[in-house]
Structures are given as structure tokens and as C-alpha cells.
Image (tube, rainbow, N blue to C red):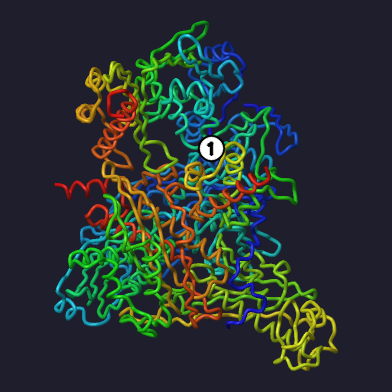
Amino acid sequence: MTDNSNGLIGTSLPNVDGRALVTGRAKYTVDIDFPGMAHGKTVRSTFAHAVIKSLDTSRAQQVAGVLLVITGEDITELGPVANGPVLDMLLIATGKVRYVGEPVAVVIGVTEEAAQEGADLVEVTYEPLTHVLDPEEAMRNEAPLIHEGIDGVEGNVCWTQQTKAGDIDAALAEADLVVSKRLVTTKAHAMPMETHAAVARYDDVSDTITLWTGTQTPHLLRNEIARVFGYPQTKVRVIKPFMGGAFGHKEGIHTNEAMAIWAARALRRPVRIELSRTEEFAATVSRNPHIRDATVAVRNDGKVLGWKETIVQDVGAYSGISPAVLALSEWVTVGPYKTPALDIEGSVVYTNKPPSSAFRGFGNPQATFAREVMFDIAARELGIDPLEFRYRNLIRSEDLPTETANGLKLDTLPIDEATDAVAEAMGYEALRSSKPPWRGVGVANMLEWGGGCRWHVNYDVDMNSVKVEMNADGSVMVATDAADSGQGHATVFTQIVSDRLGVDPSTVTVLPSDTETAPFGLGTFASRTAVVHGSALMRACDTLRERLMEVAGSTLEADPEDLEIADGQVRIRGTNRGVPVTTVAALAHYVRSVLPAGMECASLVASASYDAPSTVPDENGVGNFAANYTTSSTMVIVDVDPTTGKVTILDWASAEDVGRAIHPDLLKGQLQGGVAQGIGFALGEDLIFDDSGAVLNPSMADYQVPTAPQVPLIEDKIMTIESFDPTHLLQHKGIGESGITPAAAAIANAVFDAIGVPITTLPITPEKVLAAIESRNA
Amino acid sequence: MADHGIALVVNNEPVSTTVAGNRLLREFIREDLGLTGTKSACEDGMCGACSVHLDGDVVKSCLILAMEADGRTLTTIEGLAPPDDLHPVQQAMIDNFGFQCGFCTPGFIMTIVDILDKDIVDDPESLREDLVGNICRCTGYTRIVAAVMDAAGRKNHDR
Amino acid sequence: MTMTRFDYIAPTSIDEVTGLLSSHGSEAKILAGGQSVVILLRQRLLAPSVVISLGRVEALKGIRSSDDGVEIGAMTTYSDVSRNEVVNRVAPTLAKAAGAVGSRHIRNRGTVGGSLAHADPAGDVPVALLALDASIHLAGSGTVRTCASDDWFTGLFEVSMSEDEVLTGVTIPQPAETVRHGYHRFSYREGEYPMIVAAAVLDWDGGVCTSARVAMGGVGAHPVRLVAVEDRLTGSAVEAGDIDAAAAIASELVHPPSDVRGSTGWKRKVAVEYMKRALAEAARNSGNGHG
């Protein structure tokens, strides 16, 4: 659709949650309090790999105010949880522990203080086992086995994924230059401002469970709770209050959620379990680190002929959704470039570290870092300007539509336009010809799923549903499981409803994400909500719109085909004759006689689903795994202090294909925020482990999340390109992950330009940069 | 150990109650006073989500014992503007999309109000240096800076 | 983590404080601004049974000029120090250090006395006070004494103060008008604790450095003076060659601990570089012909 009934789509409606958020009155899970609510604290493993010899809870039980101590043995009936294809994780470790920080018991007390005191007194004795922190060591035959007896897991390799297309041997044979490098990325932590928190309530009269939790996937969580607790899905309700950030960190089921439920049932009182920041850093999921041994085959003219790579993905102790991280990483590895041959083999490998999982960008920041750094190395070896090297390989507008070697179907992909835009915004030509010493400019392009994806293991869907109901006064309620954590879903949905149904935005209410009101869906991840929920909402609104037109047509004695919605009225096109939408709504509810034949009263309610037209790739990883793809170009200018190695980012430009901008300011916010996270990923964010497997930097003081001065002010140079892609119903693309994906690559290339030495591992610490400078001088 | 008596003015209302010596001001605000707009997001004073005003100065309520506020004047995000009204900084945050998830937002607003009350803000670049006490994970800070500049401009205009 | 339970006492006079200290002994912990102590309490690295707050002892607050120099009460906040006109004129190094601490929130609470008593190895204010040759005043039960900043730092978070003493203030000697200051700090990321702090206070006569005090933080267990560097600079014009020679000496003297931010080797290079920057600043406008 391209019409725009009230002009609201494409404009920046004030955030409908703004008032609640700026006044501090928005309630997050951590703000929920019930009379008699108990609190939980988790006892965590102090060993990376050990047999639990004994677990004595007697002293903890005696603490005044301790209500319940839950151990793994107590909850064996729950079994392993399915956060991904490999059922390798219990909610509380039983028998042995596999990382420092793994839950071994949960203590419930009347206050947090009592629970903590109890947790401190749970006595666990361990028999240490040899542990392994390095994924390549873990792949060796002699490595200690972290898991045993799980189907499909061989040694410590829990999953493999290959992506092969074209003739890689021919590409390597034909190449004038073959560059091989090892590229390494880090275990960055998403660090949402709100830690994991859950409040559970059990109603023994109806035998129902209600869980308030910051989750991205309310229905999938509900279904998993129902499965492990043996409840019908109707008896489990998951409500997502305001959520203080997520970024992939809050998918699936978590121990605190399940144990709050367990305790609420056992104690018949509400229970809250909130993680501390230390626990969050030391014992919750983080980005999958990649070791990528990449080879690129290039002709003397800069033409890329093929890409060959092995990927070792360090998944930590439990795999969760991480096999999909590897798959998606491989599928976008060759980016927005014509690459006739690719051959990628990846392994997901267990180590004795906290689990890795989804984090904004999924596996794409890792892939983009590898490719774009390799391209700069190859370009400089060939004596070709890095930007020119990219131009020679880009998929250009005149090539579209096209299908890549690994089966991605591209209708729109304005990467040539994007690259032009950043080069112009930054004055690339002038920069190349003269810049001060120790200043560098770097470019990185990327290709990413344009919202949603399909991966074959858990389910063959890429869908969401919404329900829209217009009340008798014309106000509209939207029920959806879109799990907003700051994106502004309610605002965007309000725009769409207001536009399609001609109602004032102030009369639209997007209900909180709640499985009791919202129809089923997969939730919010993979940049999918604006496109997948948004398209479902379009469908539901269009159904309602048709009914409004029919009722109005009947009232106005006009053919519904001749009607339009404008200025809050249903009007006969080309005339002033119309009836307010609010009146139509009242008639539809209360006046049977004006309704067209076959329409029941109060039928201004519609549910709709949207399953994005993506497909499951084949066993070679070839297939159109996302319905469409977005692309961007990023250019960064840095200064390097040659005496300390410290990198300062001076300026940033990026041009992003957004399909169509529904809400320009919220959209830009996603890009700006992603860039800041990408700057952190590039310059310092990493969980650092000691030899025993303990995290050395589990605090904001030591984990290098950017503060304001590290992030340049980026406003006008974040540019959006509207490709009006026909795939989704609003012609838009999901861009939630686009900011972070190319950032580290662009910064690494800028540092390369500044110091003359490529940076192939993250993070780009001052010490590393100074060592690189000294290696050049040596 | 017995609790201590504490009397202070919270958001223009006198409050008199008792509190344990080891109670943090942040927990006193959130749990005892029920003012949950003040947030908790770290354990080491880095994040600033718990920022409040104590006797007119912005402070981090996670680094102060509740008893330190005895006899003092405390303002939290809930008391920044009368109900149904917004402080100009709150309005500027809305107008500039200076927040996303909103969890850090009350702390940022309390800090920004302190900056605008005491300092001359005319340069967005150097303003970033003055925001180091608050961490935002969502926005990348640019729109927060824009909100401050906007609010500063309105304030100067009103003078 | 929740703090252990303790009693909270807020005396209003120094005598009351010292009385409480002598009766509670090692069970007591003094709370100044609390910006470090509260974290330590929360981490249970401190578990006192009594916390004695100095927040209501008015005699410990304020900045006064005297014939001896500038006296700063222990409970004077970083904000007050950094904005104080006298401090900015007489001891710009201290003003800069106090203004560099943490964020405005921390500066509104953190105090000069607290920072000296806490003695973080990379504390901005302790390093500045050491470079400024400050005297530290203490009160005990019926006693008062003064400790030179040179003698103050004795180990990692250890200072020459007994458990029945309270730090009451510092005096910065009135400097000659010919004194110049340099202060530079490296923090890995803006807003976090500094990794390296360097302060230089040089006196000049006719373009020649007549005395030097150079102090650094983050290079060992506690803030240190680099006496060998001072000796090398004294009598020189502190030109580029002198600074390089001083840097060579300094690199033998500094031993920054290896941690999550980097190795000792790299940090040493940063430390030496930042010392050079502090020296260069203190040589500017000195009349040595290079500023």
C-alpha cells in the first residue's frame, strides 16, 4: 500500500509512552510489588567445571525469613528447557556445573536480605573437573567433555552449519591474490539497563500461573513454561511490563522466571527474582565470540571471486538459540557484494563459560567484521583504494532483482546509493588526499535480514498476529505480543491504526504485551516487529477498514468502493459528503438496521496473522532465509593517540536502506543506539575471564560500555534511503540491528588507515593499537 | 539493631519514619517510599539511574545511606513537576526522543536539571563530558544531548 | 549484595567523633562523603557494627585562607573545591583534580578528607595533594597532629592514621607566585576511575626550575612522588631533553598493576607519557623560554 489516509505514516508522532517514561511512572518488572511478595536469590557455582559432591541447605533453611530453598534435585520433573534445538540446559545445575555462575540453588525469603543471607549459607562441595575455556582446545580429542549423552553432540561440538555455493576451488585457482587471516570477535554483553527480573503469582483456585517478566518472546516463553510445568497453555499467562532494554538478551526462558513460578506455587505467595548487575554480567548470556579463519580470492582488478572460511563459535556451556546465530552469520557473510563462490564451515563449540546467545545483530557483526577487514587488507595489497575496492564488487541497482550465490533474493538493495551518500557526507576524496597524521577513515558495508528470518530447526514460521478492535466511540485497541523495550512499538502501531482507520491517534490504545489478550506470535527479535507485527496489523486494519466502508456505504447509500477515509471521516471520494468514523463505529455497534446484509453488530474486530515470505535454506545453507534484506554503508573518522593507542571517534556517517520510514525519529534512534553499541563492541566491550573461568569485569566500572563522550553526536549524517521494497505490506524494512552490525568493522578499518597496520581482533584496545604501531615501527 | 528515626522533605511533602542504618537511600526511596521512578541498574555508582536531588544537588542514591538524608530535602523524578505537568526537561526529552526503553531516563532527567540549574550550557560537544555519570544503553546519547540543548535554549529564551 | 547491619551515628562535633572512635574502636567506620565507602559496605569488604557519619560536623567543612596557606576542611566536597576561587588561584592542580573526579554526582558528595583516608592508588585528589606538599590534620582522643603528605600513604588503601583518629582537614602551603602546575589523567573511558594520574608542581627562577614535586597515581600501591625525577628536573630548564631524561627515570620507577584494562608494560608507557604532559604543562609560561 502506498496511500496514506491521514499523512501520519512517515511522520514522527510523539512517543505515546513518553509521559509515562519521563515522569518515572512507567512500571517495569522490578517496580512490581504485591503484598506478601517473597524474593529469591540464586546460589551460583564457583567452579567452571565440577561435580557437585554435596549440597547442604540446612543452615540456609534455618535463617529467619527464609521460606524455601530450591535445588536441582527438587525440580528434576521440569527437565531440560528448549531455548534452541539442543536440549542441554537444566534450570538449576544437577550433578555437575559447567560454568562459574551457573545456578545451583535458589533461596526464597521474605525479603531480599533474608534470601541473600540464606543463599550465603548454602554449602556446596565440588569435585573440580578439568575445565576448558578456549573453544579450539575444546575441539581437541583430549578435551574434557562438557556434555555427555546429548543427541547430535559430538565431543564438545554441539552443532555444525555449512554454507556452500559456487565453485570455491575454481575461484581460488583463478585468483591473483589470496589473502588468509584469522579474525576474532568478543563475548560482548548486551547489558540492558534493566536486569532480568520476574514476578510470579499463582492462583490456587483456578490453578493458573501469571508471570510478569521482561521478555522479548511472551508466547514462546508461555508455551515453554506450560510444557515444563505440565500446564495447558491457557493456564499460563505471561505479561511483559515496560522493559528496560533487551537487545536479544531476553529471549527464551530463564531460571529466575521458572523459579519464581516454582516458588509461587510452592509458597502460595507472589515471588520476585531480580538479578543483580554482577550476576547479569557474570552469569547471563552474551554475544557468541567467533574465531574466523577467512580466505578471500581476488583478481588483480579487485574483483572478489570467492570466500572460504571456517568459523569456531564459542557458545559457552549451553547452546540456546546460538546454532541459529551461526547459521545467520554464514548466510550474510559475503554481504552486499557479488561473490560467485563461498564455502563456509562453522562449528558451535561448548566451553566452560557462561552461555552465549543472541545479541543485537545476531551473527552479523562478527561476519561483517571479518569480511570488511579482509576487504581492506586485500584492497591495500592490490593498491586499490578501499572504497573503490567495494565499488568494484557491490551489487548495483542495475543488477536488481537478483539472487545471490547462496540464494538470497534481492529486489531492492540500494548499497551503491548508500556508499555514495556516506562518501559525499564525509568528504572522502578530500580526506584521502590530505589528513593529519594518526587520523584514519574507514568504511564498512553490510547486508542484513530486513526484519525476521526463518531457520529450520524449531519451527517453520516467521510470523506474528495482532488483534484490533474498534469500540463504539471509534477508539481502537490493539492487542499484540510485540515486546517493546524502547523501540516505540506502541507509537508506530498507533500511527498505522490511525492512518488506516482514520481515527485520532489519541484514541488508539496499544495494550501491554500479554499472552491473555494478544494472539499468538513469535515476539520481538531479528528486527522483525515493525515489519512482521506491522504487516499483520495492516491486514487486521484493512479488514476493519472494509467493514467501516461497508457500514458507511450503507449509511451514505454509496458504493463502498467509492469511499475513502480522510480527516476522521469516511467520505465519498471527490465530494464533501461523509460521515465521521466515530459515527460509523457507533452505528456498527448499536444500529442493526443500517448494517449491510450479512454483517453482525459489533463486528469491528479483526485478528490477522502475517507470516513473512521467507524460506528455509537447504542443507548447503542456500535459500532465501529472510523475506527481504536491508543494507547500509558506514564511514568513520578516527584519531589515534600514538603515545597511548587510544582511539577517538571524530565523526560518523551511515546510510541505511529502511524500505520506507514509518516513524523517522524512532527509526533514527534505533540506528543511533545501535551505532553506540557498535562503538562499545569495537573499542572495549568484552567479558574477560581468568584462568579459572571467572569473569574479571562483572561491573559497569570495568565492563567498557560507552559513556556519552565516547560516542560522537550523530544526527544529520545518519541518512536513510527509502527503497520502497514491495515485500512487506508497508514497503518497509526492519533496521533494529543495522546500527551495530558494521560499526566494529568500520572502526577497525579506520584504525588500519590511521596506523598502517590491520586490526584483526576485537576489541580494539589502546594496548593493542599501541602494540600494532610499535610492530610497524620495529 | 534498632531502626533509626528519619524525618525529611520528599517532593515537597514532610516524611517521618524509621529506617535501618544500613538502608541505602535508593532502597528507601524505591521500597519504603514506593517512588519507583528512581531506578537501580548497577552496583558501583556508574550508571546514574538512581540520580535524585538532595538539598538541591544531584547525587546517586545508591552511594548514600538513607540516614544521610535525615533532615534534608529530597526530590525524585516524581516530584520534579506538579502532577499533570511536565518539567521543561521532561518535555524536551519527549520532543527530542531523548529516551528509548526509559529505564535510565529519570536519572538522566535529574542530572540534566542539575546541570541546567547550575551551569551555562552552550556547547553540545562539551556537554557530553558532563553526562558521564549516567549511562544510556539505548539511544547513543545524541538525542539526550539534543534534549538538553533544547531545554537550555528554552530556558535562555524565558530569561 | 546487601550490607551487613550496623548502627548509624551522626555526631555534630569533632570531639564527639573522637569519643565515638575511642569507644567503638575497630568496630567503627567513618563515613565521609561515602562515595567509596558505601560501595565497600555493599560489597561487604567493610562490615562495621557502627558507622559514624561526619556529614553533620560543620567544623569539618569549608575553605579558608591563612598565612600558612589554604586550609580545606575534610568534609569539603570536590564540587566546592573545584569551584573555589582561592583553590583555583593558589592550587589549580587541586581544582583540576577535584573537578575531574567521577561525575557531578560524585563531586557533590565526595570529600577531600574521604579521598585521603580512602587513599585509592589512582585517586585524583590524593595525587594532587601529594604534589602540592599538603599537610594532613588529624584529631584523636584529646590529641591533634599533622602529617606530611609525604608520610601519609603507607600501602594499598593504607594511610598513617590510627583507628581512633579522624582526618579533619588539609593545609596547602602558600605557593610562590613563580610556581607552575601541571595535571593530566588518563582514563580508559570517560567517567570511570582514572588509570593514570600525573601532577607536577614546579617552581621557577629565571627560566630554571628551582624545585619540583612530581606525584603520580595508578603506578603502584598508592600515590607516589617520583623523587629521582624531581632531582633530575631541579636546576634544569625542563626542556624537551630534560623531560625525556625524566621520562626514562620515571619508567624505572612506576609499576602500574596489570588488570582488565591492560598490562603493566603498556600502562607504564601511558604513565610516562602522562607524566611528560604534566611536566610540559608546568613548564609552560614558566619563563624557561619555551612557553
Q: Nearer the viewer, residue A626 or A663?
A: A663
**What residue lies at 52% left-to-right and 22% top-to-bottom?**
C30
Q: Looking at the picture, how far across and down is residue A47, in whole percent?
A: 35, 47
Please name the amino acid that badge 1 sits on.
Answer: Thr
- Report the residue that reaches farthest toward the top: C142
SS label for mark 1:
loop
Residues packed near mark 1 inside 10 Å, few (<14), some (14 to 19) or many (20 plus): some
Callout 1: chain: C
Q: Tell me if residue A155 comes above or below residue A263 in the rendering.
A: below
Quickly name the residue at label 1.
C2
Q: Looking at the picture, how far across and down is residue A144, in whole percent?
A: 26, 56
- For the question of whether residue A68 can be seen, the reply is no
**What residue lies at 26% left-to-right and 48% top-to-bottom?**
A768
Q: Tell me if residue C149 comes above or below residue B136 in the rendering.
A: above
Tell me the quadrant of the picture where the N terminus of chain A can be found.
bottom right
Q: Tell me if residue B58 comes above or below residue A4 in the rendering.
A: above
**What residue lies at 30% left-to-right and 65% top-to-bottom?**
A372
Instruction: Give the image quarter of residue A8.
Output: bottom right
Q: Looking at the picture, how far across and down is residue A629, in whole percent?
A: 42, 76
Q: Looking at the picture, how far across and down is residue A53, in whole percent?
A: 37, 47
Q: Nearer the viewer, residue A183 or B144?
A: B144
Instruction: Give the image quarter of residue A737.
Output: bottom left
Q: Nearer the viewer, residue A389 or C118?
A: A389
